[in-house]
């Protein structure tokens, strides 16, 4: 039987390709893998132990039970700190950044931005959710507390980005800027195994993903693009198929593998779009580009945007190269 490559083996091989690598970064990724397994365990038993949205209840040990998004936040925060390589975390769950610069983390040089459980409203109805993360090198001196500017780096400065999808199977997908690789959790081994090496997204596809309930408030170019997707045209293989889960990781992941475009434009409730630049759009954009696709907002290429705040929102269009270019064409022409 062919032996599968585990995430840890892959990380070590990848590290060997960088002669300057010290192993610190590999250690950080290793701990992200552990946190992912912990969250996976809780997501999988969510229906059984009734911890869905029940913050405030007690479990059999008399401990307070937590909502899954709170649990995921703590699991990732703990593991990142335990790695000793992370000096600061910006999380969707925390208003302010958290910094570590003493003890184990005194030499830490990495910053992590994360959404520990994205799409968590989907948990109650057994729909896929995800974790999204991005990793940067700190700008401030090692040994001191990380500062806001460490977190407000452009996406193009990212060292690595990834997501975990807790779906029909659990997958960890990440990039260090040398293509995208996907690992599926083998529950019998308790290991992430390389299942999707060097993922490349098709240049075009048939899927468009957008919450059409917000149609009235979309920019004119997006309204026209939606009509374009629905029109019949044999040459361009239209009409396209509409698919929208409402879980960014799941929607993006499907589109990346099959070919499609994900869109979250400005709406009435969210004039700048709903998704957050630091820990949703930037990491997904890095992966999209590394898979051969594109990601931009109405202000330009996502990875070129200068962040101004930790929880900043931006409009988001990501996926297959030709489809994203077409969306851009519609936006430029009509708006
Ligand atoms: P969350 O971070 O509060 O879970 O929200 C982010 C989610 C994304 O996963 C998804 O793409 C989007 O919100 C769906 O929003 P909507 O329900 O407005 O279509
Ligand atoms: Mg989110």
Image (tube, rainbow, N blue to C red):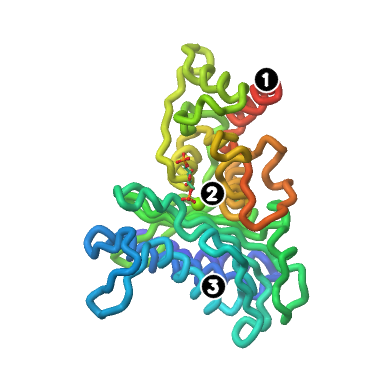
Proximity of marks 1 and 2: CB atoms separated by less than 8 Å: no
Q: Is mark 2 within 8 Å of ligand 1?
A: no
Which of the numbered marks, if any, corresponds to residue 198? 2
Give me the residue at 66% from left, 60% from top.
Answer: 159
Q: Earlier in the sequence, mark 1 or mark 2?
A: 2
Residue 252 visible to the viewer:
yes
Instruction: Find numbered disc 1 in the image and state the secondary structure of the residue it sits on.
Output: helix
Give me the residue at 52% from left, 56% from top.
Answer: 132
| Quarter of the image where one finds residue 243 | top left
Image quadrant for the C terminus?
top right
Proximity of marks 3 and 2: CB atoms separated by less than 8 Å: no
Measured in 3D between alpha carbons, the distance from the residue under mark 3 to the one under mark 2, in whole angstroms, is: 26 Å
Q: What crowding class fits label 1: few (fewer than 14 Cα within 10 Å), some (14-19), or many (20 or more)? A: few
Q: What crowding class fits label 3: few (fewer than 14 Cα within 10 Å), some (14-19), or many (20 or more)? A: many
| Quarter of the image where one finds residue 323 | top right
- Disc number lying in front (1 or 2): 1
Q: Which residue is mark 3?
A: 80
Which of the numbered marks, if any, corresponds to residue 334? 1
Above or below — where is 1 with respect to 206? below
Q: Nearer the viewer, residue 96 or 132?
A: 96
Measured in 3D between alpha carbons, the distance from the residue under mark 1 to the one under mark 3, in whole angstroms, is: 45 Å
Q: Earlier in the sequence, mark 3 or mark 2?
A: 3
Residue 211 drawn at (x, y percent): 47, 33
Image quadrant for the N terminus?
bottom left
Q: What crowding class fits label 2: few (fewer than 14 Cα within 10 Å), some (14-19), or many (20 or more)? A: some
């Amino acid at each position: 039987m062919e032996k599968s490559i585990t995430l840890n083996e892959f990380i070590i091989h990848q590290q060997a390709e960088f002669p300057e690598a010290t192993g610190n970064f590999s250690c950080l990724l290793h701990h992200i893998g552990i946190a992912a397994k912990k969250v996976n365990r809780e997501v999988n038993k969510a229906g059984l132990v009734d911890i869905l949205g029940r913050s405030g209840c007690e479990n059999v040990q008399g401990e307070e039970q937590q909502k899954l998004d709170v649990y995921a936040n703590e699991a990732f925060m703990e593991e990142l700190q335990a790695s000793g390589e992370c000096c600061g975390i910006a999380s969707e769950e925390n208003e302010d950044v958290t910094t570590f610069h003493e003890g184990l983390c005194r030499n830490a040089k990495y910053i992590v931005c994360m959404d520990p459980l994205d799409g968590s409203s989907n948990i109650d109805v057994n729909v896929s959710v995800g974790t999204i993360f991005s990793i940067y090198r700190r700008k401030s001196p090692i040994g001191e507390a990380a500062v806001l500017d460490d977190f407000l780096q452009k996406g193009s400065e990212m060292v690595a980005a990834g997501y975990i999808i807790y779906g029909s199977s659990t997958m960890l997908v990440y990039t260090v800027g040398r293509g995208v690789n996907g690992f599926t959790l083998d529950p019998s081994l308790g290991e992430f195994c390389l299942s999707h090496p060097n993922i490349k997204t098709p240049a075009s596809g048939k899927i468009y993903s957008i919450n059409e309930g917000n149609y009235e408030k979309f920019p004119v170019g997006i309204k026209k693009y939606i009509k374009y997707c629905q029109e019949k045209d044999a040459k361009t293989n239209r009409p396209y198929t509409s698919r929208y889960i409402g879980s960014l990781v799941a929607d993006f992941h499907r589109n990346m593998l099959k070919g499609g475009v994900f869109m979250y434009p400005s709406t009435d409730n969210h004039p700048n779009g709903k998704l957050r630049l630091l820990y949703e759009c930037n990491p997904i954009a890095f992966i999209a580009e590394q898979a051969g696709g594109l990601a931009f907002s109405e202000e330009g290429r996502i990875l070129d945007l200068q962040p101004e705040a930790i929880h900043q929102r931006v409009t988001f269009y990501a996926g297959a190269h030709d489809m994203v270019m077409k969306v851009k064409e519609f936006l430029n022409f009509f708006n």
